[in-house]
Image: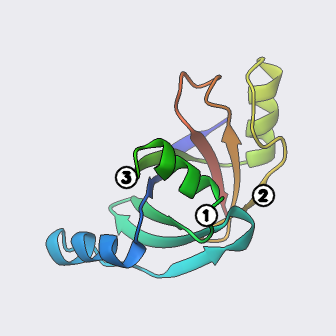
Amino acid sequence: MNVSRVDHIGIAVVNLEESLKFYEDILGITCQGTEIVEDQKVKVAFLPVGDTELELLESTTEDGPIAKFIEKNGGRGGIQHVALRVDNIEEAIEEIKSKGYKMIDEKPRYGAGNASIAFCHPKSTHGILLELSERK
């Protein structure tokens, strides 16, 4: 497996528009667009910082994974996951599984920004929700 860089850091937010004001007005980071990913029940904003991105995530439903994360976090947002860029996501998944580690996603699925993604189980990553991301 070849991990080339941190692809993005996923940050759960309660209100995307309010959160964007801080990143754009105070930090001067320009949002490069938003996207709704229906199957993940999330609205995403992309903020490039050097070779990586901050990915702000707002739940589109009360029962989505981001809503659940925020609820567990006392109603506040925070860093929800770290994504690493891999060259071949199918090979990366198989290598992780072959070494006895658990995956949440045993097959790649669509991720925001037209990426193929798969999440490693936090029990295998010492508590971190780690996403593998392949971009074409």
> Mark 2 sits on what residue?
109
Callout 2: SS? strand
What percent of the width, then of the height, locates residue 19? 32, 70
On the question of residue 5 being in view, the answer is no
> Mark 3 sits on what residue?
76
- The CA span between labels 2 and 3 is 27 Å
What percent of the width, then of the height, locates residue 105? 78, 43
Of 41 and 121, the residue lying toward us: 41
- Of the residues shown, which amino acid type is indicated by label 2? Arg
Q: Is residue 22 above or below residue 6?
A: below
| Quarter of the figure with residue 62 | bottom right
Q: Name the residue located 78 percent from the left edge and 17 percent from the top edge.
A: 100
- Of the residues shown, which amino acid type is indicated by label 3? Arg
- Of the residues shown, which amino acid type is indicated by label 1? Glu
Q: Is residue 1 above or below residue 50?
A: above
Callout 3: SS? loop
